[in-house]
Image: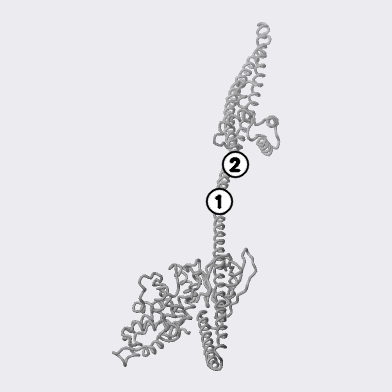
Amino acid sequence: MDLKSELLKSIWYAFTSLDVEKCGKVSKSQLKVLSHNLYTVLKIPHDPVALEEHFQDDDDGPVSNHGYMPYLNKYILDKVKEGTYDKERFDDLCWMMTMKKNYKAVPGAALLSERDCFKLFCLFNLLSEDRYPLVMIPEEVEYLIKKISAAMSQEWDGKPLEDLISQDAAVQEEGMSVWCFLEHMGAGRLLRVTSAEAFSLALDDVFLEMYHNVLKRGYMWKKGHVRRNWTERWFVLKPSSLAYYVSEDLKDKRGDVQLDRSCVVEPLPDREGKRCMFCVKTHSKTYEMSASDQRQKVEWTQAIQTALRLQSEGKSSFHHELKLKRRVQRQSSQRERSRSSRSSCSSRSSQSDDSNVPKMEKTEKEKDRQDLEIESIIQHARELEIRRREAEERERRRQREVQIELERQLKEAEMLRDSMQAEMQEKERKAEQQKKRIQELELTQRKLEAALNMEIQARLEEERARQELERLLQAEEEKRKQFQLLQEQQKAMQGRGPARDTDDGGTGEGAPSALDSASQELQHLQASRQRSHQRLEEVQEKLRNASQHVRHWNVQLNRLMTPITPGGRMQSHLSSRQMCPKKEVALASNEFVSKFKGRADRSSPKPDDDDVQLEEQLEWMEPANLSDGSDDSQEKPNGQM
């Protein structure tokens, strides 16, 4: 059946629904509305002038079905292209036009809903004979009811249909109209249904399979082309394409595989943790898929090969092909029956009644045997379908469990990642604190070095001041001894008498002058000693300040080297008192003394006696002497060595 014949069946129902008087004619205004609706649902450009031009000779009278057909063929059906319109929407338009007039629901019967009636109407048009008025013969009715029973997992019972045919002989001879079919289905005369919901679900499966040409559908795993990961998708196979969605509600379509004569289906070995794999190769891509089990893999590959066969033969509907095969079989069986009836009539006159009885019994036995074989085949197919659904359910549960396990592992990985990020942030914070501590240590060390240099300079200046004071004291002591000797000489000379004074007049005059000069020099030395003593006090004060700076920066350095934790201040303070010696510091001053000695050597290549004495003093100087030397210097009285 081509596209035009398929569309004409539904349009015939719409046209006859407009024929209120049942005279075979419809007014032009109604045909305009019908044509406009057909233009819309079939997505054809509107041509409102074509109807007036086509029927311009018959302006007032109605148009018959035969008069409307040329216009319908020329302006509508010849312009329709398959795949450009929604087939279900088109049939729904024709159904709504004819249902209001012709369909009468069975009172008290809640088996069929309006949507179920529409699906049965579409399936009726698919299986009906290609003659008008449209009817469906009992064999096709039986085929459709068997499909619905198999979808419901219910055993087929042909007794209701046989009873109906026996009661109404016109059904066997002429067939069954769609309204009669819907009435019998709604009343339960063709199929015994215990659950309306189960019947609706089964009818939906049959509707998708036969009306929408769905060869197979179900969940499979598909490998991506970009990210190369495996994702579970809901696949829907039709003769022209293999579409895949996120779930079976068909709301989120992810893509499709366009099937043509160049496509090939090949099995693949198990890998990457997937089994029952196969691929569909097109001219541009290769789609890798994994079925739930081996049986599903075989069914999918066979269904795809069937779709490819239909494409190569130029056929768009699998069930239309099956319908044609059933029709050919019926015609051949009818010819066989007519031939056997003619031969039996010719041989009946030559045979007696006794010879006919065994043949009839044999025929009956053969028929019974065939019926038993058919029933066993149907039962076997039903059992296979039940096992398939159970296996699909088990596999779906297993995949759901695997998905839950993967989600749990993903959550654990995310929690581990968050904990690692928190740990890294904590380590970064500690590293930043450590970096700041190192910078503070370097700064404190530089401050401590500067303070130690100042202390060394102050101690050297103190040593020079002490040496100068010692020299002045020695000189003062010598002058004082010289002055005392002169005084003694003067007293001795005064005790000799005047005679000697007269004799030694010249000598007596020179003694007081020498005594005066010695006294002046002694006073000058005393003044110098006082100034040197003041200088020594200033240098000692400077040394004390430098020592305080060294102790301060030494404490800061110790604090940075051993940071105080909460609650550990008192413990560290007590342990430092008990275990650490008083005069020990964090950094020894030997390094700075050696640096200073090297600097002094470079500045003065020829050392004098004072520099040699300074170097001897620097050799025995230690950190304790640098930090606490001011206390020892204060114990000695000023001006004494």
Q: Quadrant of the C terminus?
A: top right
Colour option used? one colour
Residue at (65, 34) in percent of width and height = 589
Q: Is residue 393 above or below residue 127?
A: above
What is the number of the mark on residue 421? 1
Q: Is residue 399 above or below residue 477?
A: below
Residue 577 spot, x, y in % from top left: 60, 28
Residue at (35, 76) in percent of width and height = 104
Going from N to C along the chain, the mark reached first, 2 or 1, is 1
Q: Amino acid at mark 2?
A: Glu
SS state under label 2 = helix
| Picture quadrant where residue 289 is located | bottom right
| Picture quadrant where residue 21 is located | bottom left
What is the number of the mark on residue 442? 2
Asked whether the residues under the numbered discs 2 and 1 touch, taking CB atoms below 8 Å apart as contact, a structural biologist would say: no
Residue 363 spot, x, y in % from top left: 56, 83
Q: Is residue 222 above or below residue 81?
A: above
Residue 517 spot, x, y in % from top left: 63, 19
* Neighbour tally class for label 1: few under 14, some 14-19, many 20 plus, Cα within 10 Å: few
